[in-house]
Image: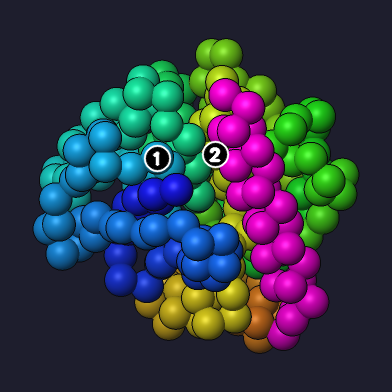
Amino acid sequence: MRIHYLQHVTFEGLAFIKTWAVARGYSLSSTRFFANEPLPQMQDFDWLIVLGGPMNIYETEKYFWLTEEKRFIEQAIKNDKTVIGICLGAQLIADVLGAKVTRNEFKEIGWFPVELTADSPVFHSLPKRFKALHWHGDTFELPRGAVHLARSKGCENQAFVYEEKVLSLQFHLEATPASVQQIIENCGDEIVEGKYIQTPVEILREDEYFVQANQMMWQILDNLVNIDNIH
């Protein structure tokens, strides 16, 4: 299988998803927008993964490639690709599917509980409630036809699936201590006093949370492969 991913900044890469893809023997290619790299042809990949970043989906004048990226995501969905969006990526998918992306009431940064809201093959074998890493200030509304999959106390819409193959995750199950350290080094100024904001020390000391999150990411990706094979 051929996986293409869209990367917005140097310090937010695939993290644990790369570990899974390499272990499964899948090929990886990327478009790094910060390096002005071109997008591939639709026939050149099977899965599309849209990663996170500190920008907002509506900052199209500052980040000129956002408009082109949205068109590309829309085409990937229309071409029946499996599409996964994480954080900013999830918001971009929501926007492409016609849903609003707005400022959330609370900024969430750190490990906070997520509760599943629906049974879905995508989340098969996941616990109904688990700790996930969050780092966001915006949120998305549910697109028409999407299934709401998860919520947290600080943010109602944490995940959705659309037509079984398009998955948006507001939280970061792919995070590793090394990947989070990079985000802290580049976006540490966002860590201020807040109801759902932890300190860097609190975030990085939870080794077991990282292990559990990565196990769940592995399960979700395998579930999507199985769904792909059925289709």
Image point (29%, 38%), residue name: 58
**Quadrant in the picture for the C terminus:** top right
Image point (66%, 58%), residue name: 218
> How is the protein colored in the picture?
rainbow
Depicted 121 relative to depicted 55: above or below: above
Q: Is residue 29 magenta?
A: no
> Magenta span covers which residues?
205-231
Q: Which mark is residue 46?
A: 1
Depicted 29 relative to depicted 42: above or below: below
Give residue 91's position: percent from left, percent from top: 45, 39
Q: Quadrant of residue 40?
A: top left
Which mark is in front, 1 or 2? 1
Spatial distance from mark 1 to mark 2, Cα to Cα? 17 Å
Q: Is residue 217 magenta?
A: yes
Q: Quadrant of residue 60?
A: top left
Q: Residues within 10 Å of mark 1 (few under 14, many from 20)?
A: some
Give residue 160's position: percent from left, percent from top: 62, 32
Depicted 146 relative to depicted 68: above or below: above
Amino acid type of the residue that numbered disc 1 sits on in the rendered structure: Asp
Image point (86%, 49%), residue name: 127
Side of 63 relative to 175 (left or right): left
211 or 139, nearer to the observer = 211
Image point (63%, 27%), residue name: 230
Secondary structure beneath dot 2 equals strand
114 or 62, nearer to the observer = 114
Q: Which mark is residue 168?
A: 2
Side of 16 relative to 187 (left or right): right
